[in-house]
Image (cartoon, rainbow, N blue to C red):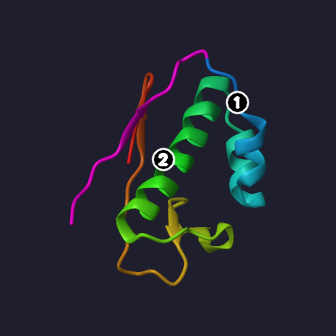
Amino acid sequence: MLRVYGVQVPVDARTPAQWLALLPLPRRNRVAGLRFPGDRVRALAADRLLRYALRDTWNRPVPLDSWRENRCGKPELAGEPGIHFNLSHSGAVVLC
């Protein structure tokens, strides 16, 4: 099943602190370490969009502790080898 989700994020948007607090510590540190504020906002928007897409597609919430990064630094879900996704952003658009 292929689904595409997207959201437009204002380029000058501020990083929502409550979104950052929802991330597991390793992901939070990675997002906080991004150089440009717009990149941090888009990374957070991508995380929220992905959680929405997974909940919409599989009709279940995604526990925070299920996230991990593979050896290439890409996010994946622990224990879910059949779920594949990709995140992308350019300018004000974030896609999942």
Residue topped by disc 1: 15
Q: Residue at position x 67%, y 66% from top?
A: 64
Q: Residue at position x 51%, y 44% from top?
A: 46
Q: Is residue 72 above or below residue 8?
A: below
Report the residue that reaches farthest toward the left. 1
Q: Residues within 10 Å of mark 2 (few under 14, many from 20)?
A: some
Q: Position of residue 28 (x, y in %)?
A: 73, 50
Cα–Cα span, label 2 and label 1: 15 Å
Q: Is residue 45 left or right of residue 27?
A: left
What residue range appears in magenta? 1-12
Q: Position of residue 22 (x, y in %)?
A: 73, 53
Q: Residues within 10 Å of mark 1 (few under 14, many from 20)?
A: some
Q: Is residue 74 above or below residue 38?
A: below
> Residue type at mark 2?
Leu
Q: Secondary structure at mark 2?
A: helix
Report the residue that reaches farthest toward the bottom. 79
The answer to whether residue 9 is magenta is yes
- Please tell me which residue lies in front, 45 or 69: 45
Q: Earlier in the sequence, mark 2 or mark 1?
A: 1
Residue topped by disc 2: 49
Q: Position of residue 35 (x, y in %)?
A: 68, 29
> Residue type at mark 1?
Thr
Q: Is residue 61 left or right of residue 59?
A: right
